[in-house]
Image (tube, grey):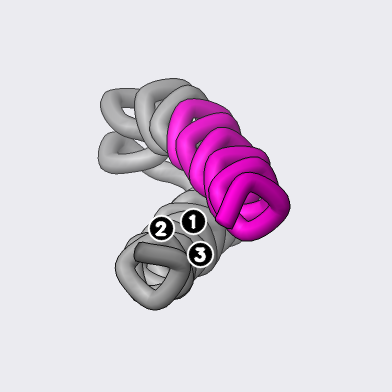
Amino acid sequence: MSRVFFILMVIAMVLVLASLVVGLIAMIKGGEFNQKYGNKLMRARVTLQGIALGLFVLAVWTQNNE
């Protein structure tokens, strides 16, 4: 079960990194795309970070209970 959490954590961390990079590039370039999606990308990043943290906690918790 911990392997499943590890794989899900890696996927969540890659998604966090992708949303961060896209958000930073949009912010650097500015323009219409940044105005339309900049805030949404940063909210998505925070949400994905929360999911990754929750998966980490579940992985540690299940590892200790096995």
Disc 3 residue crowd, few under 14, some 14–19, many 20+, Cα 10 Å: some
Please report the bounds of the magenta region as a residue range.
46-66
Residue 26 appears in the rendering? yes
Q: Is residue 54 magenta?
A: yes
Q: Are discs 3 and 1 less than 8 Å apart at CB?
A: yes
Residue marked by disc 1: 16
Label 1 to label 2: alpha-carbon separation: 6 Å
Residue beneath label 3, please?
Answer: 13
The one nearer the camera, 17 or 40, is 17
Please tell me the numbered disc located at residue 12: 2
Query: Does 40 appear above or below 20?
Result: above
Q: Are marks 2 and 3 in contact (CB under 8 Å)?
A: yes
Label 2 residue SS: helix
Q: CA distance from mark 2 to mark 3?
A: 4 Å
Q: Secondary structure at mark 1?
A: helix
Amino acid type assigned to the residue bearing label 1 in the image: Val
What predominant SS class does the magenta segment belong to?
helix
55 in relation to 4, above or below: above
Image point 47% across, 28% down: which residue?
A: 47
